[in-house]
């Protein structure tokens, strides 16, 4: 047990590395002014290694795959393979290379892998299945800024566990490393020695890349008595925290190697008001011109040549500029077709959108790429695109000029888009300077929404029924005044569920109401609209719950704790030509409550001093709130003979006993019925019993009139009959109703009102059925009596707050040094994460068993 101590560093290497941090000259860490950049390199044979010869930093990745260095030609030597590469902006992959003994023969000067773009969007360093590789040998590597590390399945590879991977990682809480299926450490030599003692090796933690090459770990001027905020970055003699962005020093100014970008005043996270060159430096506009490059406004990059959809233009001063050129007719069928439209402001031609793959998540790509388009000189055609629910991805479109028209008539041509419900963003006007509209076979787009575009036609031509038919637009939805507004409210919620309640539906609405559909998605920012990112066939981030009853309450479960959601509600109704009622709500928001976090994801421990263990851990994968504290405990642990040989220093907790197991939730596409199903809502048909008699009604006087007509003798006889049938004229004045009649009318009105009230009460009761099904469970509050018995807790419905033990650390700290421990002793380490604002809101303990170094090893490391 102990207290917080600085990170231990061997004296034999601490002194020279301290000079490096203070800016002393060194051939290892000195920055060369003569640097040459090259693009991504694919090394598949020995001859390809020559591509690395004149390259100091790679703007991209390096992939060595299937390289055979056992070639009998003998036209190379180890010295000829060595490159001058010191920086790789993306990732390094070494895969199935034969005859490769050490990467030092190829990358003797590699200092940083930035991981700006990752292999499989995850990895920045991958060394996998190299049968002859014996050591990594990246002897000058100081930082892997981003991405995971994977060194696996190299049967002869040693000196993997002896590398301080925690030191190399630029963001230890977000990066991970996997070291598996390499040569067992017990069969590998020691750092600084060719002989090996089994017990000695198992406890050895000296940091090296090979037998005779110690790992470089520059240390700050001071680690002890620094502010807590400095962490392991340390501080200078004045107590100012060192900048983690500087890999080789304490200060970002005059730093020889920056982790991200090197600006004018020092190391920065990103280039601001400057241009990015080679993805490593920030320079000004003038400096970019002087280097013979082109300053590109997009992304503020300094490039050698213009991107694919931009052309070079020379101004009067002879300077080259890149101008976005979007000429021609563009046909978008998939996300690949959008590349030529990147950054287009004016499309000098026409745009056709015909999305062929209904499962492609293309709506977000449309919003990102086409948001800059302001004018289309030709026409806009949207056809056969079931994915689209709106054209709001053209959010900045101002005009369709119509220089070229569909069938020499139409500037806006929208046909056969099954799920299209909306056209432009709200309060947005797109001027159509020439041509007219053509809308057909859009069954969910209301006819009146199309007619609202009449004001967009600069020609003033009236929209005809032939061009925009009410019979082929909006026939599958309810439109116009029949659309009502719903007013949902959050009635109650907890950490993973919410209960939503609606206002009572009136009598008329209840006649056709089948149920409701509830749509919701995660929304970190309250800027969601009903059509943002919506995919007509459900391939988006919206979840949907469909309820086929008339209850005005609904319980949405399976939510993430401490997460903000957006939601809206719509009715499911039966529709007939003379009864059309539907209702929607506006977008609303709610945030779930915090909850206990999942366990700490991983624990890593090492011991280079016999009385200390340095711990690192990764935060919970599901924090479920704001992590306020970590609690660390350490106690002696008796290890049985069977498990003594197991390495406990690097413990992953994927199989830890965890009551908060993470269950895979439903995908948005599979939540609720499928939108492209004809029986989407399982609609019922209404039968009107009074309609059938009206169709077959026959007057009772028909046969009577016919018989009387057959009795007529002559014309005078007919006139006499008609005279007798003439009705007597009613009196000119209407008699006043009697008291009895008035009493009957009053009683009838009272009876009707009672009937109406009883009917409404029955319908309200119908909407409030089974209230017990919508109960939200809440955690019990803390008991006032900290020693309350179980019976008292049950009676008062409260819980006793747990008493936590161990070292309390802030939630932003992910390392701790245990001191005053016994040498060569196993310790059982537990770490718990605790969420703010939750009673007993600490995770289940994550455990690791770590052994302190022996005194002999400590002396060996110190060179005693």
Image (spheres, rainbow, N blue to C red):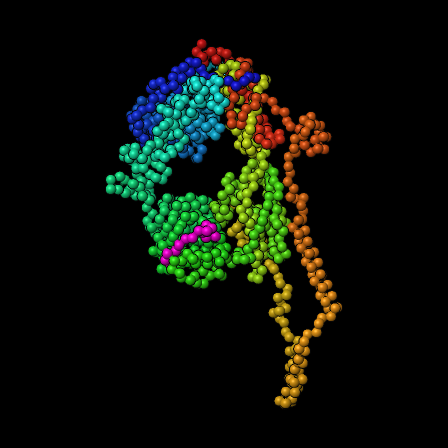
Relative vertical location of residue 36 with respect to residue 552 in this rendering, above or below:
above
Q: Is residue 300 left or right of residue 478?
A: left
- Which residue appears at 52% of the width and 50% of the height? 675
Residue 153 appearing in the image:
no
Question: Tag count in the figure?
Answer: 0
Residue 349 appearing in the image:
yes
- Which residue appears at 66% of the width and 49% of the height? 768
- Which residue appears at 72% of the width and 33% of the height? 795
Question: In the displayed image of the protein, which residue is found farthest to the top?
Answer: 864
x then y, percent, for residue 421 = 49, 53
Question: Which is the main secondary structure of the residues drawn in magenta?
Answer: loop
Relative vertical location of residue 17 with respect to residue 422 in this rendering, above or below:
above
- Which residue appears at 54% of the width and 57% of the height? 481
Q: Is residue 438 left or right of residue 825?
A: left
Residues in magenta? Answer: 422-435
Q: Is residue 198 left or right of residue 32?
A: right
Name the residue nearer the viewer: 539 or 190: 539
Any magenta on residue 841? Answer: no
């Amino acid at each position: 047990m102990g207290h917080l101590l600085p990170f231990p560093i061997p004296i034999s290497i601490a002194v020279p590395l301290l000079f490096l941090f203070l800016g002393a000259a060194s051939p290892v860490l000195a920055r060369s002014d003569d640097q040459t950049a090259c693009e991504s390199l694919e090394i598949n044979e020995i001859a390809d290694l020559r591509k690395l010869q004149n390259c100091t930093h790679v703007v991209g990745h390096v992939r060595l795959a299937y390289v055979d260095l056992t070639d009998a030609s003998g036209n190379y030597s180890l010295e000829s393979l060595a490159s001058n590469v010191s920086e790789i902006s993306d990732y390094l992959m070494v895969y199935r290379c034969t005859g490769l003994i050490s990467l030092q023969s190829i990358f003797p000067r590699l200092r940083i892998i930035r991981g700006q773009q990752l292999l499989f969007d995850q990895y920045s360093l991958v060394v996998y299945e190299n049968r002859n590789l014996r050591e990594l040998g990246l002897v000058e590597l100081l930082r892997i800024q981003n991405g995971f590390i994977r060194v696996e399945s190299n049967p002869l590879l040693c000196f993997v566990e002896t590398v301080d991977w925690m030191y190399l990682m630029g963001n230890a809480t977000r990066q991970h490393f996997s070291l598996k299926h390499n040569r067992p450490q017990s069969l590998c030599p020691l750092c600084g020695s060719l002989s090996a003692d089994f017990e000695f090796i198992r406890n050895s933690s000296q940091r090296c890349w090979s037998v005779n090459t110690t790992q470089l770990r520059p240390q700050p001027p001071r680690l002890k008595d620094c502010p807590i905020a400095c962490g392991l970055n340390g501080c200078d003699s004045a107590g100012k925290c060192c900048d983690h962005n500087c890999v080789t020093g304490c200060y970002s100014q005059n730093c020889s190697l920056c982790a991200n970008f090197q600006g004018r005043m020092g190391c920065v996270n990103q280039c601001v008001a400057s241009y990015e060159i080679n993805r490593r430096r920030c320079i000004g506009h003038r400096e970019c011109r002087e280097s013979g490059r082109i300053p590109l406004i997009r992304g503020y990059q300094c490039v050698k040549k213009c991107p694919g959809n931009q052309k070079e233009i020379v101004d009067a001063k002879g300077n080259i500029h890149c101008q976005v050129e979007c000429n021609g007719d563009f046909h978008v069928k998939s996300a690949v077709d959008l590349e030529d439209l990147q950054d287009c402001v004016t499309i000098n031609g026409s745009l056709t959108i015909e999305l062929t793959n209904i499962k492609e998540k293309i709506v977000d790509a449309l919003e990102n790429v086409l948001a800059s388009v302001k004018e289309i000189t030709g026409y806009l055609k949207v056809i056969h695109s079931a994915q689209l629910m709106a054209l709001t991805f053209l959010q900045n479109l101002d005009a369709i000029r119509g220089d070229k028209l569909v069938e020499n008539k139409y500037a806006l041509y929208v046909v056969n888009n099954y799920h299209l419900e909306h056209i432009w963003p709200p309060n947005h006007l797109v001027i159509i300077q020439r041509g007219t509209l053509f809308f057909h076979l859009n069954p969910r787009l209301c006819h009146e929404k199309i007619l609202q575009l009449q004001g967009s036609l600069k020609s003033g031509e009236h929209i005809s029924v032939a061009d925009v038919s009410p019979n082929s637009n909006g026939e599958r939805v309810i439109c116009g005044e029949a659309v009502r507004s719903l007013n949902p409210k959050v009635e109650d919620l907890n950490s993973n569920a919410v209960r939503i309640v609606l206002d009572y539906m009136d009598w008329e609405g209840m006649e056709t109401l089948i149920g409701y559909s509830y749509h919701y998605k995660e929304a970190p920012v309250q800027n969601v609209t009903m059509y943002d990112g919506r995919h007509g066939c459900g391939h988006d981030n919206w979840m949907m719950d469909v309820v086929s009853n008339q209850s005005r309450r609904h319980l949405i479960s399976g939510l993430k704790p401490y997460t903000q959601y957006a939601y809206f509600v719509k009715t499911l109704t039966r529709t007939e030509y003379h009864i059309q009622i539907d209702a929607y709500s506006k977008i609303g928001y709610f945030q779930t409550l915090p909850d206990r976090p999942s366990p700490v994801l991983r624990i890593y421990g090492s011991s280079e001093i016999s009385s200390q263990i340095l711990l690192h851990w990764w935060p919970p994968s599901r924090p479920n709130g704001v992590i306020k504290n970590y609690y660390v405990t350490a106690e002696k642990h008796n290890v049985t003979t069977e498990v003594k040989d197991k390495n406990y220093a690097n413990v992953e907790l994927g199989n830890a006993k965890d009551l908060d197991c993470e269950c895979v939730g439903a995908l948005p596409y599979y939540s609720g019925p499928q939108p492209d199903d004809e029986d989407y809502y399982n609609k019922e048909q209404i039968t009107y019993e009074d309609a059938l008699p009206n169709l077959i009604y026959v007057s009772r006087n028909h046969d009577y009139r016919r018989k009387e007509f057959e009795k007529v003798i002559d014309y005078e006889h007919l006139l006499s009959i008609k005279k007798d049938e003439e009705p007597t004229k009613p009196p000119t004045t209407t008699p006043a109703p009697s008291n009895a009649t008035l009493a009957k009318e009053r009683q009838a009105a009272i009876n009707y009102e009672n009937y109406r009230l009883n009917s409404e009460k029955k319908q309200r009761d119908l909407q409030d059925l089974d209230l017990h099904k919508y109960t939200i469970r809440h955690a019990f509050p803390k008991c006032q009596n900290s020693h309350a018995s179980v019976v008292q807790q049950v009676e008062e419905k409260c819980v006793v707050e747990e008493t936590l033990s161990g070292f309390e650390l802030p939630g932003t700290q992910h390392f701790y040094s245990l001191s005053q421990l016994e040498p060569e002793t196993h310790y059982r380490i537990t770490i718990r994460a605790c969420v703010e604002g939750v009673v007993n809101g600490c995770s289940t303990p994550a455990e690791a068993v770590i052994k302190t170094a022996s005194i002999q090893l400590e002396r060996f490391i110190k060179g005693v």
